[in-house]
Image (cartoon, helix red, strand yellow):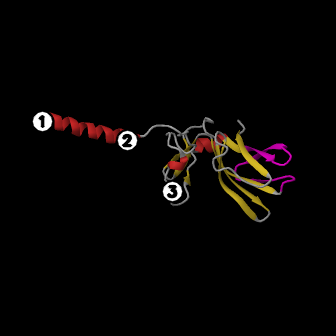
């Protein structure tokens, strides 16, 4: 009788353990982490994340390349923007500022950083304004262009990648 009771208890523990694990269905890897928990399932942070860029990564990348698409005509233009600078995109009224670039974006709790200098998961922190109005402030991802995408009635902006610093 004691053995039977122990087996039943063991079975219940195993069932609860398996139920808590869950499968991987519908869990595409998010740009925010190396695990396979979708962004929608992650708890949101209370405040803004701290961006920590190692010096060797800062030295290796001087800017970003973004593609601006006119959604009405389908015309596309690739624009390079140096980190820390902004660029007025001719004919659009949009100004894009490149704040930072991470070749291998990774989010560890409240810290955003790059796990390497290889372009494994390129991301750029940008601001977009039109006239005096700020339209967007956040991250664009090369591999995940629809995650936190910039939305505008006429234009789309996608991150193409980073611009390497000139080697001396």
Where does the image place residue 162, in percent across and percent down from the top left? 69, 41
- Residue 65: say if magenta: yes
Closer to the chain start, of discs 2 and 3, is 2
Closer to the chain start, of discs 1 and 3, is 1
In 3D space, how far apart are the residues under numbered discs 1 and 2 (Cα atoms)?
A: 27 Å
Q: Main secondary structure of the magenta part?
A: strand
In 3D space, how far apart are the residues under numbered discs 2 and 3 (Cα atoms)?
A: 27 Å
Q: Tell me if mark 1 has few (under 14), some (14-19) or many (20+) residues whose alpha carbon lies within 10 angstroms of its own.
A: few
* Lateral position of residue 125 relative to residue 75, left or right: left
Closer to the chain start, of discs 1 and 2, is 1
Which residue does the numbered mark 1 point to in the structure image? Answer: 1
Which residue does the numbered mark 2 point to in the structure image? Answer: 19
The kind of secondary structure element at disc 1 is: loop
* 67 in relation to 129, above or below: above
- Residue 38: say if magenta: no
The kind of secondary structure element at disc 2 is: helix
Give the label, 2 or 3, closer to the camera. 2
* Lateral position of residue 167 relative to residue 155, left or right: left
What are the residue bounds of the magenta stretch? 64-92
Give the label, 1 or 2, closer to the camera. 1
Q: Tell me if mark 3 has few (under 14), some (14-19) or many (20+) residues whose alpha carbon lies within 10 angstroms of its own.
A: few
Where does the image place residue 135, in percent across and percent down from the top left? 72, 59
In the rendered image, the residue lying farthest to the left is 1
In the rendered image, the residue lying farthest to the bottom is 132
Residue at the image position 84 percent from the left and 49 percent from the top: 72
Where does the image place residue 151, in percent across and percent down from the top left? 72, 53
Q: Are marks 1 and 2 in contact (CB under 8 Å)?
A: no
Residue at the image position 36 percent from the left and 38 percent from the top: 18
Q: Which mark is residue 45?
A: 3
Q: Tell me if mark 2 has few (under 14), some (14-19) or many (20+) residues whose alpha carbon lies within 10 angstroms of its own.
A: few
In 3D space, how far apart are the residues under numbered discs 1 and 3 (Cα atoms)?
A: 51 Å
């Amino acid at each position: 009788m004691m053995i039977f009771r122990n087996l039943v208890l063991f079975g219940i523990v195993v069932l609860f353990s398996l139920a808590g694990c869950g499968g991987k269905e519908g869990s595409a890897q998010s740009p925010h982490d190396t695990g396979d928990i979708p962004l929608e399932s992650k708890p949101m942070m209370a405040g803004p994340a701290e961006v920590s860029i190692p010096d060797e990564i800062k030295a290796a990348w001087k800017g970003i390349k973004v593609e601006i698409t006119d959604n009405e005509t389908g015309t596309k233009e690739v624009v390079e923007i140096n980190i820390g600078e902004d660029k007025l995109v001719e004919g659009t009224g949009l100004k894009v500022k490149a704040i930072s670039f991470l070749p291998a974006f990774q989010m560890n709790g409240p810290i955003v950083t790059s796990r390497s200098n290889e372009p494994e998961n390129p991301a750029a922190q940008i601001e977009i304004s039109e006239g005096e109005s700020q339209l967007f402030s956040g991250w664009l991802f090369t591999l995940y262009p629809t995650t936190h995408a910039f939305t505008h009635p006429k234009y789309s902006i996608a991150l193409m990648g980073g611009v390497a610093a000139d080697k001396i």
